[in-house]
Amino acid sequence: MSKITLTIDEQKIQVEEGMTVLEAAREVGIEIPTLCYHPDLALHGACRVCVVENLANNGLIASCVAPVEEGMEISTRSSRARRARSRNVILLLANHPNDCLGCDRNGTCELQNIAYSLGIRHETVEELAGEKRDLPLDNTGPALKRDPNKCILCGRCVRVCEEVQGVSALQFSKRGFDSIVTTAFDLPQSEINCANCGQCATVCPVGAITEISDIEQVWTALEDEEKHVVVQTAPAIQATIGEEFGLEPGTIVTGKLVAALRKLGFDRVFSTEFSADLTIMEEGYEFLDKIQQGKRLPHITSCCPGWVKFAEHNYADLLELVSTAKSPQQMFSTLSKTYYAEKSKLDPKNIFTVAIMPCTAKKFEKEREELRDSGYQDTDAVLTTRELARMIKEIGLNFNDLADEEFDELMGKSSGAATIFGTTGGVTEAALRTVKEKLTGEPLERLNLGLRGIKETVIEIGDLTINVAVASGLANAAKLLEEVRAGKSKYHFIEVMACPHGCVGGGGQPLPVDNEKKDMRAEGLGSIDQRKYVRKSHENPMIEKLYKEYLGDPLGGKSHHLLHTSYQKRDKN
Amino acid sequence: MACNCGKEQTNLEKYLAPLKGIMKKYKKEEKYLIPILQESQDQYGYLPEEVLKEIASSLDLSLSQVYGVVTFYTQFHMEPRGKNIIRVCMGTACHVRGGTNVLQVIQDELGIESGETSPDLKFTLETVACIGACGLAPVIMINDDTHGRLTPEKIPAVLGQYLE
């Protein structure tokens, strides 16, 4: 690759050919505002907010898509560049609802931030105020809602859904002022082939796509004296919620998280990691059984509800390969209203179960008709990391100063294997740790599979050779599944997480986010596993107690009834 | 939905047979989406949901992608179209010489608004910006025929020509 010499804001620089002006500027520490640009998605060049001036030919160019050229004299600060940028933002605001105060993204909105940093005044926007759209909201959920009136047509959701997830549930339709990002035939979210992964919500710069909130429901339960409110927190939350309070991505705040949940008034604060260990027991034994009985492989994991719904829409012919083990959220909730109710002498009808999840698809999962093995809806409410942070802020807790506290006993203890569930590859590693030890008595080496794309490895367990593949991002998963469908897959075990990086990159996680931040979150989470005393699910003493005193054996009658589920074919479109 | 052919699998297959014939002529590539849509619309008169679903799945596109293209181009229609397409000119010359009146009378005669199709599927009524026949203002086109210098009184007879 040859080098290109250009100046940016009077600094002479040399960069690789093929780089964009935006990337070159960032190399030398110059920030140019962007809206439709996202580092993890294909270039689009639609919003023109990143416009800069090339003084060599007086051209105004969109820096996010313009490649560097020899002799360019870029000014990101010239009066023409600043005025053009400002004008483009004002034109976006001209059709945008002016209700920042009531918007879910107030404070994390990229349009709001840019308007503020460009010094755009209310009067200027009023002067240019154009026609506003009055389109219906889609809040059929149960996971995500769309407000097309807030949409600025940046196309990030369209790109993430197509490029990263291979779903393409959302597309631009119509034209001109009527242009809108919508589903096929404008069908409601609840009726389309959407996995509810929420990646669209994580890339949306404004409040056009957000989660459907359970906050009010949770406050009502907490304030109801009849209700015994049990909360579980997913493994990934402890490595991400700190970001909501100004901490670096990957900062581990487990103890503060527990303290905050107690202060919010939850009666018991438990960990989904407890039931992740249980998932490993059930799923590990299921995999062992498939190998020993010579049943059809590969075995495919089932803990990610986005992946499960995607499979139901697109790979119904392969559902028999998907583990019947419920997800950790659902195992936990079922046990809250059975095992825990029994142990604590509580009537399950008065138990209200809340799950703190990095995920929007979990909101769909809790509504599934078949997930009522306790005799009630097993999970009552799901809060995303963002929603929980909002509740913590609402009661004015100074999160970073909270003294660390421990999870409650009974369903609070977990192994390191359970912690890494929150990252791509974690479920595989956790399951194989248990499988290998059960079969050979030898511990499994750390896999270190990496965090992006499709990873594969071969694991020798005694005389068994197990080919393993791990995919995060549904487009990646689809590549593996196409091989399985064609009968050309060599794998025995496939793990799928709908979101890139797994749950640390989930649709309910703090915003804004990109792959670099997700790397940091995953590293943070991995460090907990290294430090934990118990690192294998089958050695978790509370899991041993649960089987001994309540469930019997993994895959046994009671386990089968309470901890396993079934799937259904859904339309492809 | 306009047709109920889709209720049974065999009926659906029969209904989609002409489409399958069209699809055979093209490779299964995204770039043939528009010609396939055009031919399908010629065949079916419009683009029903079942047809769009079949096109999407055979080109391995998502339905939202196909829907996006169909709604972008004004040449594509997702509602049944009338046997005869009336285009009323709304250009300046026609406007000055009473084009709005002409439109109103046609709407009253057919009992439909601009953009709609009569329940008997005989007529679809549309307005266009200018058809370039200002000398004949106010002017309308029905299919490929031009009818100029119209007055409200002449309209029933003009429409009558297409009722056979």
Image (cartoon, rainbow, N blue to C red):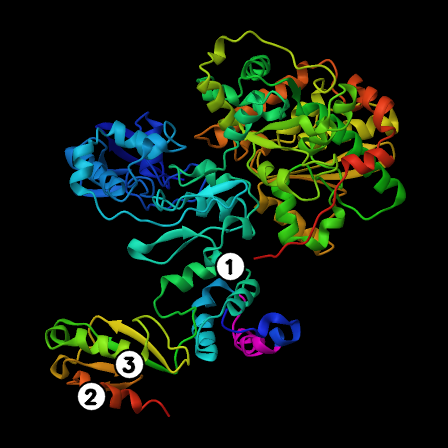
A163 or A308, which is in the foreground? A308
Q: Residue at x 80, y 27 (%)?
A: A434
Q: Is residue A482 left or right of residue A132?
A: right
Label 3 amino acid?
Answer: Glu
> What is the CA distance from the residue labelled 2 to the residue labelled 3?
12 Å
Secondary structure, mark 1, is helix
Q: Is residue A142 left or right of residue A339?
A: left
x then y, percent, for residue A560: 82, 37
Indicate which label's residue lies in the foreground, 3 or 1.
Answer: 3
> What is the CA distance from the residue labelled 1 to the residue labelled 2?
45 Å
- Label 3: few (<14), some or many (≥20) within 10 Å? few
Subunit that carries the residue with mark 1: B
A60 or A573, which is in the foreground? A573
- The quarter in which the N terminus of chain A is drawn is top left
Q: Which residue is mark 1?
A: B63
Label located before the other in sequence (2 or 3): 3
A306 or A476, which is in the foreground? A306
Indicate which label's residue lies in the foreground, 2 or 3.
Answer: 3
- The quarter in which the C terminus of chain A is drawn is bottom right
x then y, percent, for residue A429: 72, 29
Q: Is residue A136 left or right of residue A187?
A: left
Q: Which residue is mark 2?
A: B154
- Label 1: few (<14), some or many (≥20) within 10 Å? many
Majority secondary structure of magenta residues: helix
Using the rendered view, name the quadrant where residue A431 is placed: top right
Secondary structure, mark 2, is helix
Using the rendered view, name the quadrant where residue A358 is placed: top right
Q: Which residue is mark 3?
A: B109
Numbered range of the magenta stretch: B14-28
Label located before the other in sequence (1 or 2): 1
